Amino acid sequence: MKDSYKLWQVLLAILPKTLRYSMGIKIDSLFVEVIEYTSMASFLEKSEKLPYLKVAIRKIDTIKILLMIVWENRGIDDKKYITISESLNEVGKMLGGWSGQLIKSASVKTSA
């Protein structure tokens, strides 16, 4: 997530002002929230992590949609959009895998 955010910071600096101070600020805020939720989840007991991961995943999905809108409005070029999208997809896969492991672990405990 940290690497995705670093990519975003580079993009935020080059966004046109009309997008930077609207969509850009919202996307930046969502990035920080995802970092916050994943950080909290990493320090919680296993049984308490899932709600935080679900929120982080929803926020990643929102970032992807907002980035697509920025790209469609020509705020970033194709190459930059692809780079950050691939990075966010990787983050989504990792969070999804973490969430899946927790769900699987919880279902094993309840069926035992």
Image (tube, rainbow, N blue to C red):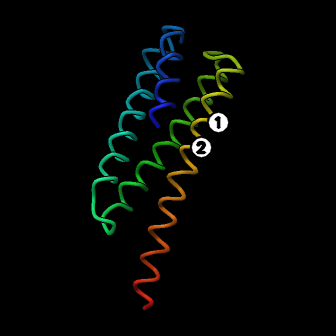
Q: Is residue 21 above or below residue 89?
A: above
Question: Camera-side residue: 24 or 101?
Answer: 101
Which picture quadrant has residue 85? top right
Amino acid tagged 1: Glu
Q: Is residue 104 above or below residue 91?
A: below
**Whole-percent x, y for residue 58 in the image:** 47, 49
Q: Residue at x 42, y 91 (%)?
A: 112
Which picture quadrant has residue 34? top left
Residue 86, disc:
1
Is disc 2 placed on a helix, strand or loop? helix
Q: Residue at x 42, y 33 (%)?
A: 31
**Whole-percent x, y for residue 2 in the image:** 44, 33
**Whole-percent x, y for residue 35 in the image:** 38, 39
Residue at mark 2 to residue at mark 1: CA–CA distance: 6 Å
Residue 90, disc:
2
Residue situated furthest bottom in the rendering: 112
